[in-house]
Image (cartoon, coloured by chain):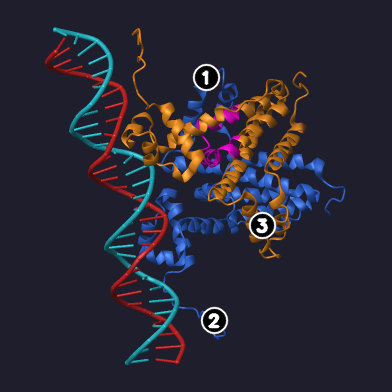
Chain colours: A orange, B blue, C red, D cyan
Amino acid sequence: MISKTPTLERRTSALSKEAIIAAAIEILDGQGETALTFRALAARLATGSGAIYWHIADKQALLAAATDHIIAGITVDEVVAKEPRQAIRAFALGVFDAIDTHPWVGGQLSRDPWQHAVLRILEAVGGRVQALGVPADAQFNVATAIMSFILGLAGQYALGARMCEGGIDRTTALDEIAARWAQLDPENYPFVRLIATQLPDHDDREQFLAGIDLLLAGIEPLRHATAPRG
Amino acid sequence: MISKTPTLERRTSALSKEAIIAAAIEILDGQGETALTFRALAARLATGSGAIYWHIADKQALLAAATDHIIAGITVDEVVAKEPRQAIRAFALGVFDAIDTHPWVGGQLSRDPWQHAVLRILEAVGGRVQALGVPADAQFNVATAIMSFILGLAGQYALGARMCEGGIDRTTALDEIAARWAQLDPENYPFVRLIATQLPDHDDREQFLAGIDLLLAGIEPLRHATAPRG
DNA sequence: GACAGCTCTGGAACAATGTTCCAATAACAA
DNA sequence: TTGTTATTGGAACATTGTTCCAGAGCTGTC
């Protein structure tokens, strides 16, 4: 503890927790979720699986760490951050873009809702909900509602991306789903059949923002008179 | 093709798709998600894994079919169904209760968002959104937003239940999480630390309904003058 | 420099799983 | 009966996450 060179930068040569996570992210981004195995990871790091386990507990921890690394990288413009509503929108879009770039993040977020990355999201959203003047006894429900919406849509986009992994174009993938929906029983699925026509042309980003705006509009009646400055 | 007795009720003795799904649900409910393996299923059905594959494509299809069976069982009281807002609330609570009884449903719903069970939810929600007088060009975004919220929270409750699988009491599990949150850095996680105190006492069902109500309140400004009768 | 103790490595070995394959059987049609 | 198809049961396979362990390299003490 009092040593002059605490844990002196050892020549861990290549291997370290950070290096492992970086390699994992490369595999996840490049070849998709299913390609991340300890063998593939060991091969890329030119080592054995045992060495990896020295640095990381198990696969779940590895995925959580990788996800946290991505989510931690989300930033909100300082100017925008002044206005809570815009800050929530901006942060949510940051999550959206992160999932767009790293589709596996979506799956991981919705799979393990109590990992650290989710806390980052909850904190980012919750802080702004406070700033919006939502009364204390409603903050919990409001913040978790927004977070749940984000995680829910995250899972959906993740699947969309997973489908495209097989080299299938996004447009043709959506067309395929729309065609399947259009063949459903008109008696029991009128609504699904109706929106099947809108599915291929819809804009994910706009859909995402529309949901956020819906929740923000729902917050309005709850707000205290003591609105935040500005 | 033109035979008098098309596919005449064969003596499939015990094995059939329905019997397999029923057995799968029993295992899932009784021993949890991880206990459902083709070997365990074959043992319970007193057969081999090969026989199961004759009736069902793969494990994903099995889980999707089991989930669909549960979701299809959700009903909304006829009287309540007359009022779209109440109908949405009632159906959402139906999903909540289904996940409460069959925790694995939550995980499965958020894992594969385009399975049939999700379409049932989308149809149930979407139909009521239409009835609420939401203009056509907003119906898609509104309905998917509500569905995403439901799926997102579903995933969260599923994990809560997964934790309790190990025989851990729900209260102690939440206490444990709250304690971990309370130890976070006060600088970066003020909000999470704050709601950590509320976490152990909160009511899942109320949290769920609060989110739905938030979304429903957000819909109000969108509604057409041509409100539904009643 | 030699020795002991620690951290860390690499890969073999293990247990479990989803899936495939196939020989054997049951049900039916001619 | 005989041939054909539908269905079964379980062995076999490939792949995975994980554990184990023999040893290599570093650090500090005599």
B71 up-or-down from A63: above or below: below
Name the residue that disc number 1 marks: B185
Q: Nearer the viewer, residue B70 or B146?
A: B146
| Left or right of A49 in this view: B119 | right
* Disc 2 to disc 3, C-alpha distance: 32 Å
Name the residue that disc number 2 marks: B6
The answer for which chain carries disc 1 is: B
The answer for which chain carries disc 3 is: A
Residue B216 locus on image (x, y percent): 73, 43
- Residue type at mark 3 is Ala
A56 up-or-down from A203: above or below: above
- Residue type at mark 1 is Asp
* Disc 1 to disc 2, C-alpha distance: 69 Å
The residue located at (57%, 85%) in the rendering is B2
What's drawn in magenta, residue-wise? A98-123
The residue located at (46%, 38%) in the rendering is A27
